[in-house]
Image (tube, grey):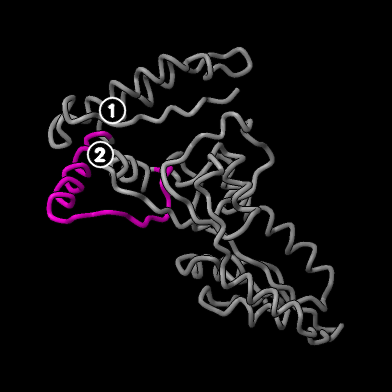
Amino acid sequence: NHIPYRIMKGPSNAQVSPLSGCYRYFLTESEKALRHYRDHFVFRGHDFSDFIYRYIFLKTEEYFLKIEDEARCYSKLMSQNQIKALVIEEDYASKGSFLTSFMKHYGVKTLCISHAMVPLDFSVPVDQQKYAKSTTFVNSEYEKIMYQARGWNADPILITGIPRYDRLIRLCSRPRPRQNSNNIKILVCGGSWWPQTPDDLGYLGLHIEAHRELHLAAMLEFFSVAREFPQIELMIKPHHLESEPYWKSFIQSQRNPNKIRLMHSRDDIFRLLMVC
């Protein structure tokens, strides 16, 4: 089962002022959506709709009050500036979704520069690929396909490319230095040490790619295999600066940590690719 996208158009000026009581509008609309799609919360014969209503929906009032505060800030911003367009990095999660909807409601064009989109192995049917809050700029055809697979309308997704890809092509055309067979360096891209939580930005399954629970279990297996080959030296480049001390502690807890080098998150990935 999947839940069809329900995109609220937002309250009109006649319905409610953004500065007072709009959180009640969002509560009402969310409850309507929950009641309408309750059959989609049935899994293997178990109906979770009442659980979701009691333990999730009834606790959302604080969130919608926060949204009302945001609406006040955006309204003030609109009254003091003649905003024609807004550039954002995401328009679908808790960070940017309401901002985008608010601006779109008042006729402000939103341009979303995609940070990234993790891969997946399913696809929303083409006739249901309708989500389109912004004109979205992506790095590649593959990334566009991943957006479409999640339900995005393909029309406002534009492929711009990215300078890193051009640099990778040039790098691949150069002869690679021959590695000493007695000292083989392998570059390992270190993911996040953040635990997976229900309010994480992103999609269910993201923790498989980037988060602590499964990522570290996979790394332990990788280290175990690498220890069988003494000529291998692992070079770990953390993705986040904040993760560096955690990776350092993790490496020091391993057997034969001298064969594992911790790089800095700010290190040039292209320089590392040339030596690994």
In the rendered structure, the answer to whether residue 23 lies left or right of residue 117 reads left
Mark 2 or mark 1: whose residue is earlier in sequence: 1
Question: With 197 as the anchor, is 259 left or right in this view?
Answer: right
Q: Please name the residue that numbered disc 2 is placed on.
A: 67
Is residue 92 on the magenta stretch? yes
Query: Three-letter amino acid code at disc 2?
Result: Ile
Picture quadrant where residue 16 is located = top left
Residue 141 lies, with reference to residue 55, above or below; the image says below
Residue under pointer 1: 26
Q: Label 1 amino acid?
A: Phe
Q: Position of residue 166 (x, y in %)?
A: 63, 73
C-alpha separation, residue under disc 2 versus residue under disc 1 = 9 Å
How would you rate the neighbour count of disc 1 (Cα within 10 Å): few for under 14, some for 14-19, many for 20 or more?
many
Where does the magenta region start and end? 64-93
- Report the front residue among 213 and 44: 44
Which type of secondary structure does the marked residue at label 1 adopt?
A: helix
- Which corner quadrant holds the N terminus? top right
Marking on residue 193: none
- Quarter location, residue 271: bottom right
Viewer-proximal residue, 44 or 170?
170
Label 2's element?
helix
Q: Residue shown at 41%/19% (left/top)?
A: 34
Provide residue 95's location: percent of width, then percent of height.
36, 48
Q: Are marks 2 and 1 in contact (CB under 8 Å)?
A: yes
Task: Please tell me which residue is depicted at 68% across the width and 59% down the height of the picture.
Answer: 219
Question: Can you tell which quarter of the image residue 250 is in?
Answer: bottom right
Along the line of sight, which residue is nearer the eye, 225 or 113?
Answer: 113
Magenta stretch: includes residue 86: yes
Above or below, 1 against 209 in this view is: above
- 254 over 24 or under it: above or below: below
